[in-house]
Image (cartoon, rainbow, N blue to C red):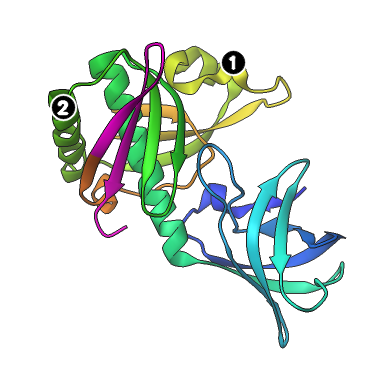
């Protein structure tokens, strides 16, 4: 099973690894700093290098393990090859900023509008969030944007750690974590907290990458909303210089 280095240190952008298996244009490594698509966050891209050879990593997917999809003219590296991986830093940074901003938005909407998040999708230059709510007005959107930027300006700390699932189910808000949707085989969950450790603004289960303080998110602009169905709204937002 691939060791996911990005879980402990999402700022790490390179690593040395050994190819364990090759399946068509995909390779499995013994460890990786590449984030696989999941939780609304797109996969990392970048390169793998071995000697004079370079392969572009164009997609990363997690199935039974983590598969790195490669592109290039030559054959992929063979099993046993030692490779150096390098993640596209700008893309990872943008995704980390957007994912942290999405956590703030989800917590804000639940606390102040009783609007639980039902889905989200992040990109390198924009994001959207779906939630259970009848309809946001223009005044609502303006208030949400103001409050989000107050949280950014507060420069709240962001932490992540692993917690026993039973403890997490007892301690965390089920409306935010949705731990009931996880397979029974998952006995530990990664927790992300934003704010004071004793009384965090947000605490939820998440395997994505995040910045270390909310000030790193930058200015948030709520760019619009649309109705997604009965009592479900979609909120769109962008970050400055993302």
Residue 51, how many percent across, how many down? 73, 85
Mark 2 lies on a secondary structure that is helix
Q: Earlier in the sequence, mark 1 or mark 2?
A: 2
Residue 161, how many percent across, how many down? 49, 38
The disc at residue 84 is none
Circle 1 or circle 2, nearest the eye: 2
Label 2 Cα neighbours within 10 Å, binned few <14 / some 14-19 / many ≥20: few
Q: Is residue 122 depicted above or below 12 in this figure?
A: above
* Relative side of 63 to 199, left or right: right
* Relative side of 32 to 97, left or right: right
**Which residue is painted at 77% across and 66% down in the image?**
18
Q: Is residue 227 one of those drawn in magenta?
A: yes
**Which residue is painted at 54% across and 39% down in the image?**
207
Can residue 211 be seen here? The reply is: no
* Relative side of 110 to 40, left or right: left
Q: Quadrant of the C terminus?
A: bottom left
Label 1 Cα neighbours within 10 Å, binned few <14 / some 14-19 / many ≥20: few
Find disc 1 in the rendering and name its residue.
180
Q: Which of 187 and 22 is in front in this view?
A: 22
Residue 171, how many percent across, how many down? 46, 16
**Which residue is painted at 78% across and 41% down in the image?**
64
Q: Is residue 182 one of those drawn in magenta?
A: no
Q: Give the range drawn in magenta.
A: 223-242
Disc 1 from disc 2: Cα separation: 34 Å
Q: Which of 242 and 176 is in front in this view?
A: 242
Q: Is residue 167 depicted above or below 147 in this figure?
A: above
Name the dominant secondary structure of the magenta segment: strand
Q: Is residue 71 depicted above or below 38 in this figure?
A: below
Find disc 2 in the rendering and name its residue.
138
Mark 1 lies on a secondary structure that is helix
Q: Is residue 46 depicted above or below 6 in this figure?
A: below
Can residue 107 be seen here? The reply is: yes
């Amino acid at each position: 099973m691939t060791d996911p280095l990005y879980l402990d240190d999402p700022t790490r952008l390179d690593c040395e690894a050994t190819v364990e298996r090759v399946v068509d244009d995909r390779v499995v490594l013994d460890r990786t700093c590449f984030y696989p698509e999941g939780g609304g966050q797109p996969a990392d891209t970048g390169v793998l290098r071995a000697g004079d050879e370079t392969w572009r990593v164009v997609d990363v997917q997690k199935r039974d393990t983590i598969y790195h999809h490669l592109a290039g003219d030559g054959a992929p590296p063979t099993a046993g090859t030692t490779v150096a991986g390098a993640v596209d830093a700008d893309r990872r940074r943008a995704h980390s900023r957007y994912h942290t901003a999405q956590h703030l938005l989800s917590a804000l909407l639940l606390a102040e509008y009783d609007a639980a998040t039902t889905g989200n999708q992040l990109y390198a230059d924009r994001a959207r969030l779906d939630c259970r709510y009848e309809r946001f007005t223009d005044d609502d959107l303006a208030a949400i944007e103001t409050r989000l930027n107050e949280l950014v300006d507060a420069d709240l700390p962001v932490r992540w750690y692993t917690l026993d699932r039973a403890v997490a189910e007892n301690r965390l808000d089920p409306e935010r974590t949705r731990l009931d949707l996880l397979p029974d085989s998952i006995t530990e969950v990664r927790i992300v907290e934003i704010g004071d450790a004793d009384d965090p603004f947000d605490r939820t289960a998440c395997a994505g990458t995040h910045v270390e303080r909310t000030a790193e998110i930058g200015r948030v602009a709520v760019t619009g909303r649309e109705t997604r169905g009965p009592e479900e709204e979609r909120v769109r937002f962008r970050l400055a210089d993302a």
